[in-house]
Amino acid sequence: MSWRPVDCHAHSLFSDGALTVGQVADRVRSLGVVPSVADHISRDVSRSVSDIDGVRAYLDALDGFPVLRGGEFCWHDSLWRELPPDLVLRFTHRLGSLHAIRLADDTLVRAFARRLPRAITVREYMSGHLASLERLAREMPVDVLSHPTLVALPFKNVDPSELWTDAHERRMVDVLFEANIAFEISTRYPPHERIVRCAVERGVRLSLGSDGHTLAQVGDIRRPLALARSLGVRDEDLYDPLRHGSKTRSGQAVLA
Ligand SMILES: [Zn+2]
Ligand SMILES: [Zn+2]
């Protein structure tokens, strides 16, 4: 069978997506892309799989469809730490997300809150962001860092070159390389090209993710794929849980 890209990151009605698992599978396959469902598994996302029984039911449901079984876990929430090993093994791949970061004084800054908990400079925020990333990489057995350049809403419009200095970018890619975590090129939160180039030059694997929630979004990884190719990355080196394995150690082919 010829190579097909994998959309490692898409949501269904199990969390905040608008489609059933079957609809995600059908739509993504129709685009010539290998589907996966990677719903939120967290106690700190409003529509999410939010307890262990829920995770079991979610995985049972995914078993009935030709989709890779992913999950998007919040680093700052403890649910991922509580999953029993038999459930962990059933994921084909797992994504770690900084939906909140901790500053040096332990203040939690949520990515999607409109207001900051107190006055915070870009410099202080980014220092906390990178320290949180280092903790994520050390603590979380995930395969992919979701939307690596997502920052808290109040900093969203800051120029990427101010947020992501040369030193910040190098620190991020070093951390990912050492922890063997792939850098996601997200359709929803597109990274600036320089940081992706920096990841490629460091030898960090890239992963493609629509982060899609709707019929128009799931499986649309055209821009991430074009960016990866433009940087000279070979298609077969893009993260595919079945080809490259996972820290969950689940390698069974689910796509006949
Ligand atoms: Zn996310
Ligand atoms: Zn997501």
Image (cartoon, helix red, strand yellow):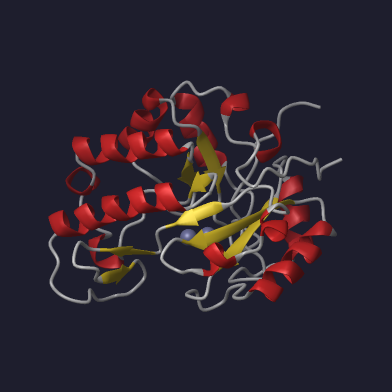
Report x, y in % for residue 151.
31, 58
In the rendered view, would you say 49 is above or below 73? below
On the image, which quarter does residue 196 sit in?
Answer: top left
Residue 227 percent coordinates (x, y): 46, 33
- Check the picture and name the quadrant holding the N terminus: top right
- The residue at 81%/50% (across/down) is 66
On screen, residue 173 versus residue 105, left or right, reads right
Q: Quadrant of the C terminus?
A: top right
Write the residue at 51% across / 26% down. Answer: 229
Q: Determine the image quadrant of residue 183.
A: top left
Give the x, y percent position of residue 136. 41, 53
- Residue for point 74% across, 62% down: 59
For this rendering, which residue is in front, 166 or 138?
138
Q: Is residue 247 left or right of residue 177?
A: right
Q: Report which quarter residue 247 is drawn in.
A: top right
Q: Is residue 218 above or below residue 231?
A: below
Q: How many marks?
A: 0
Residue at left offset 33%, top offset 74%: 113
Q: Is residue 219 left or right of residue 65?
A: left
- The answer to whether residue 20 is left or right of residue 195 is right
Relative to 138, residue 44 above or below: below
Residue 4: x and y, percent? Answer: 70, 33
15, above or below 225, in the image = below
Tell which of 91 and 125 is nearer to you. 91
